[in-house]
Image (cartoon, coloured by chain):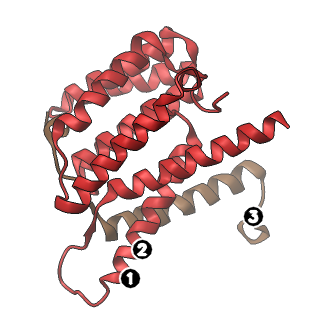
Chain colours: A brown, B red
């Protein structure tokens, strides 16, 4: 119930930035894997 | 027709207006106090969870799409105990059988819960994300929201770069509102283009 009762509404800027950049890298890697391209070809 | 939700928000064009008003109110509270009342996020989440389970299930079928949402709701109810992994697993399995809408919805609900538990953001931010993806279970919404949160975090870090040794936080709901607005605007643009 902590999730349902929680009222906090702020995000940690540093962690969000790192998580976002990691997510972008993962998306690029998956896109490369799906298309069969190497990172240098992008 | 709306691209993301199987048409039920098109049948009720007031839905985007209500979403905008809801996000505006929450953003005001978030900017002012960095908190929002729990009922303002729990009630929409419960309502949409039940709607998505029984009335307008993702991918158009109660089995397995609605069942996936039902188990995702159970996961949230059990989120204080390790037993939440069991309904989460069943929800993921059913979503895998269902289709992209259920996969986006269940995946984003799991992510919202995990990101709250690890302290990346507050519980209200997680519930707002869950409500938005219940309304519009579209991967483009998730991408847009992620991008706006990334911009928000970068802006916060750049504006507060002289502050050292303290945790730098930012109100996430206004950025989620911006992302939702961009998504809805781009969906309208695509819909107009598809009729030409």
Same chain for the residues at labels 1 and 2, yes or no?
A: yes
**Label 2 element class:** helix
Q: Is residue B105 visible?
A: no
Q: Are marks 3 and 2 on the same chain?
A: no
Residue B114 x, y percent position in the rendering: 30, 45
- The picture quadrant where one finds residue A38 is bottom right
Return the chain for callout 2: B
The chain identifier of the residue carrying mark 3 reads A
Which disc is residue B154 wearing?
A: 2
| Mark in the foreground, 3 or 2 | 2
Residue B98, image x, y percentages: 55, 19
Give the position of the N terminus of chain B as an image quadrant: top right
Q: Which is nearer the eye, B15 or B92? A: B15
What percent of the width, then of the height, locates residue B111?
Answer: 37, 43
Q: CA distance from mark 1 to mark 3?
A: 33 Å
Residue A6: image x %, image y %? Answer: 15, 43
Q: Going by the image, does A28 lie left or right of B15?
A: right
Residue B63 position (above or below residue B128): above
Badge 1 marks a residue whose secondary structure is: helix
Q: Are marks 1 and 2 in contact (CB under 8 Å)?
A: yes
What residue do we see at 49% from left, 53% from top? B179
**Residue B158 badge:** 1
What chain is tagged by disc 1?
B
Residue A38: give its label: 3
């Amino acid at each position: 119930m902590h999730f349902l009762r929680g009222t906090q509404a702020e995000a940690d800027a540093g962690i969000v930035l790192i998580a976002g950049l990691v997510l972008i890298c993962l998306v690029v890697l998956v896109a490369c894997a799906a298309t069969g391209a190497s990172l240098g070809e992008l | 027709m709306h691209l993301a939700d199987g048409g039920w928000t098109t049948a009720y064009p007031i839905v985007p207006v209500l979403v905008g008003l809801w996000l505006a109110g929450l953003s005001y509270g978030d900017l002012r106090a960095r908190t929002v009342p729990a009922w303002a996020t729990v009630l929409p989440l419960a309502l949409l969870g039940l709607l998505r389970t029984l009335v307008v299930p993702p991918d158009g079928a109660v089995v397995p799409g609605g069942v996936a949402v039902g188990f995702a709701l159970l996961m949230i109810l059990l989120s204080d105990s390790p037993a939440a992994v069991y309904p989460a697993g069943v929800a993921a399995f059913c979503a895998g059988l269902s289709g992209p809408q259920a996969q986006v919805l269940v995946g984003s609900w799991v992510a919202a819960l995990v990101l709250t538990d690890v302290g990346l953001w507050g519980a209200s931010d997680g519930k707002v994300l869950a409500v938005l993806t219940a309304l519009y279970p579209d991967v483009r919404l998730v991408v847009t929201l992620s991008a706006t949160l990334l911009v928000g975090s970068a802006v916060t870090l750049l504006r507060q770069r002289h502050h050292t040794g303290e945790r730098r936080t930012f109100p996430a709901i206004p950025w989620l509102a911006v992302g939702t607005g961009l998504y809805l605007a781009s969906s309208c643009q695509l819909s107009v283009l598809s009729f030409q």
